[in-house]
Amino acid sequence: MPGPSENGKWIHLFTDYPAAYDRSLWDFPFRFHLSSRHGYAMNDYRVTVSKDYLVFASGHFITYGEGTCEPLHGHNYRAGVTLWGDLDGHALVYDFVTLKREMVAILAPLDHRVLLPTDNPHLSIATDDGEIEVRTGSARYLFPEQDVTVLQISNTTAELIATWIVDRLLERLDVRGVGGIHQIEVEVEESFGQSAFCRRRLDL
């Protein structure tokens, strides 16, 4: 019976690892685990944080098609994050308390703000005397500068807001010198049952 690859080569579980006959070590339907007493393991580890306080209330509008702009509106967004990685010396992928604090800090600039993208070709954005003016087609918006967060994305879709959060989290992980993280996924929920996800592989 063919099994998982080891050092780039396929192994035969029943021949190379007799413990494979122990059906209790199988996690049906996909994964085979040999316990540590057999000297071989294939465990994937991940941690997820999705708390009721990882929320931000923001106004936005997106463009679509040939420059059509939807009306200004808002959402009570919710965010969640999952990290895949190796266990560290304390048997942690990443500390839950620290991860929650990082997410709270990342989301803070988005809360009770109008979100505007810097790289949208259908929007003209100008700042003058404490105000931000946005023009798109025949529409014109004027916002107090302190009520706006400008994001380096092309559209304030849930998908790209999730991408922005991934970028900010990676910056914070790099500062902390965290290693062993293989993959990050961020969920941004616009409303109940309506979410977008950004997943990034870090080991490619």
Image (cartoon, rainbow, N blue to C red):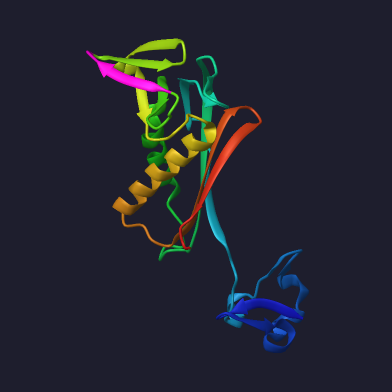
Residue 34 placed where, x, y %?
Answer: 64, 75
Q: Is residue 59 above or below residue 1?
A: above
- Report the residue at 47% width, 41% height from top: 163
Is residue 24 visible to the viewer in this orientation of the structure? Answer: yes
Q: Main secondary structure of the magenta part?
A: strand
Q: Which residue reaches farthest left?
A: 129
Residue 19 placed where, x, y %?
Answer: 70, 82
| Nearer to the camera, 134 or 150 | 134
- Report the residue at 66% width, 31% height from top: 193
Is residue 111 visible to the viewer in this orientation of the structure? Answer: no
Horizontal side of 128 relative to 189 (left or right) equals left
| Nearer to the camera, 14 or 137 | 137
Part of the protein shown in magenta: 123-129
Res 141 quadrant in image: top left
| Nearer to the camera, 67 or 4 | 67
Membership of 65 in magenta stretch: no
